Image (cartoon, helix red, strand yellow):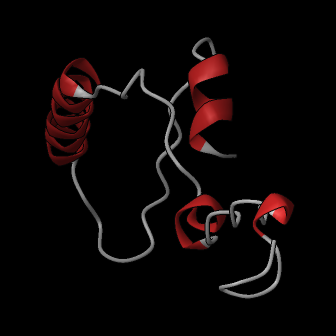
Amino acid sequence: MSWGDAAAADDEPLRIEVVRGDPTDEELAALIAVVSEEYASQEATATASDLPTRSAWHLSARNLRVPLRRDLGWGRYGG
């Protein structure tokens, strides 16, 4: 499940899997409280820029050359 899926599935219960040790109910409750509070504070301060970003391609691409002026001729003295 990705973070986007987790946000959409708020009605699903929280699932924690303990892979090592034997935590007490109080320790699990403290862990859930700390992680939930940190997530809520980060979510509240997270902002995204409204300005469109320039892609790496756009930044590295060279500008197009100005068209040649055909009315000047081929040489210094052409015309």
Q: Nearer the viewer, residue 73 or 30?
A: 73
Q: Position of residue 32 (x, y in %)?
A: 26, 36
Asked which quadrant contains residue 64, the reply is: bottom right
Using the image, determine if residue 20 lies above or below residue 29.
below
Q: Residue at x 65, y 66 (%)?
A: 57
Q: Position of residue 12 (x, y in %)?
A: 63, 20
Instruction: Pick the quarter of the image with the C terminus.
Output: bottom right
Q: Position of residue 18 (x, y in %)?
A: 42, 63
Q: Residue furthest top?
A: 11
Q: Nearer the viewer, residue 3 or 47?
A: 47
Q: Is residue 61 left or right of residue 20?
A: right
Q: Is residue 7 left or right of residue 72?
A: left
Using the image, determine if residue 14 lies above or below residue 74.
above
Q: Residue at x 62, y 33 (%)?
A: 4
How many dots with numbers?
0
Using the image, determine if residue 76 lies above or below residue 30.
below
Q: Is residue 19 left or right of residue 73?
A: left
Q: Is residue 64 left or right of residue 7?
A: right
Q: Residue at x 27, y 28 (%)?
A: 46
Q: Nearer the viewer, residue 14 or 49?
A: 49
Q: Position of residue 53 (x, y in %)?
A: 49, 42
Q: Residue at x 29, y 66 (%)?
A: 22
Asked which quadrant contains residue 73, the reply is: bottom right
Asked which quadrant contains residue 69, the reply is: bottom right
